[in-house]
Amino acid sequence: MLTEGLSNFNYRVDFDSGDEPVVLRIYGRDPKVCQKEVDLLRLLRETVPVPEVLRVYANGFDGVGPFIVLRYVEGITFRQLRRTGDEEAVAQAARSIGETLAAFHRHTFAERGTLGAGPAVTDHFLNGPNAIPEFIDSCLASPTLRRRLDERTRDRVHTLAWSRSPELARFQDENCLVHGDFGNRNVLVRRERGRWRVAAVIDWEFAVAGSPLFDIASFLRYERRLAPSREPRFSQGYERGGGKLSEDWRRLARIVDLTRLCEILAQEKLPADVVIEVAELVRETTEDNSI
């Protein structure tokens, strides 16, 4: 087993014959999620490093599924690379990740929303000029979140989100391809010709059409101004790849990330260690005077 998520399972399959290994990805969701990811991987194959789809069983087979078979990609996750403590390797990979992110952000859709098979927008979300602070408020109203986050922090989250609502409204017209879970574990890297580069971006099941700032915020979630590891190489790579960044993108990215952090805290079934970690991230954001 390579990774185990809440609904999907990934296995590396090796063959006694010596044939190259493959990845068996089994979906716990409905067939539409499987087909969505397959269509995205095929769309991106020529412009972005993603695993090659070899076989698709969108309706399952012999009691298993739905599932797909992917060509195995040699590499380690960016998370594993960071744990080596090799600062130059991390910086090289971060630059490559920025370039890769800019490449798939060039794919746009006619409207924003959740993506389905095609890929095409199937459901709309976060619409309206104040969509982001309104969504954060809806999460703050959740009884589950209120048990996990103290009142003072909740009030500061609300105030922070609404204080930046005019700037956040600028992103409501952006409809690019957003990975939806662009973190350390979903980017594979490897050393090629003496430099660390992206080998593949994996796990596209949460992809949406929206603002690129959501992916940027997700990738920089654990980056801190006084102890940078990804910056400035990541943003340099993003702009070199054609991505556009506003002057205040770092501050706005931290606020945008509150949508995901608050959404996580509103989920009922969550491991205790995750609750502690996410709640602390929210507190750090509200107490950062640079935002």
Image (cartoon, rainbow, N blue to C red):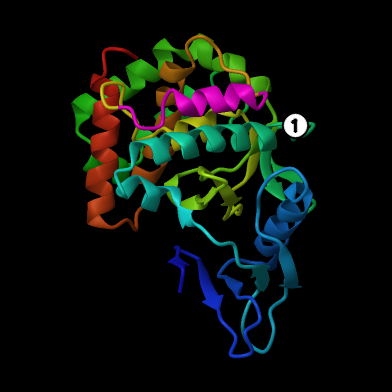
* Residue segment shown in magenta: 228-242
Tag 1 secondary structure:
loop
Asked if residue 250 shows in the view, the reply is yes
Residue type at the position of mark 1: Glu
Percent x, y for residue 121?
74, 42
Instruction: State which quadrant residue 86 falls in.
Output: top left
| Vertical relation: 29 (above or below) 100 | below
Residue 197 belongs to magenta span: no
Q: Residues within 10 Å of mark 1 (few under 14, many from 20)?
A: some
Quarter that holds the C terminus: top left
Residue 239 belongs to magenta span: yes
Front residue of this view, candidates 68 and 35? 68
118 left or right of 257? right
290 left or right of 38? left
Asked if residue 129 shows in the view, the reply is no
Percent x, y for residue 103?
68, 35
* Residue at 54% over, 38% down: 97
> How many numbered discs sit on the rendered protein?
1
Instruction: State which quadrant residue 150 falls in.
Output: top left
Q: Which residue is mark 1?
A: 111
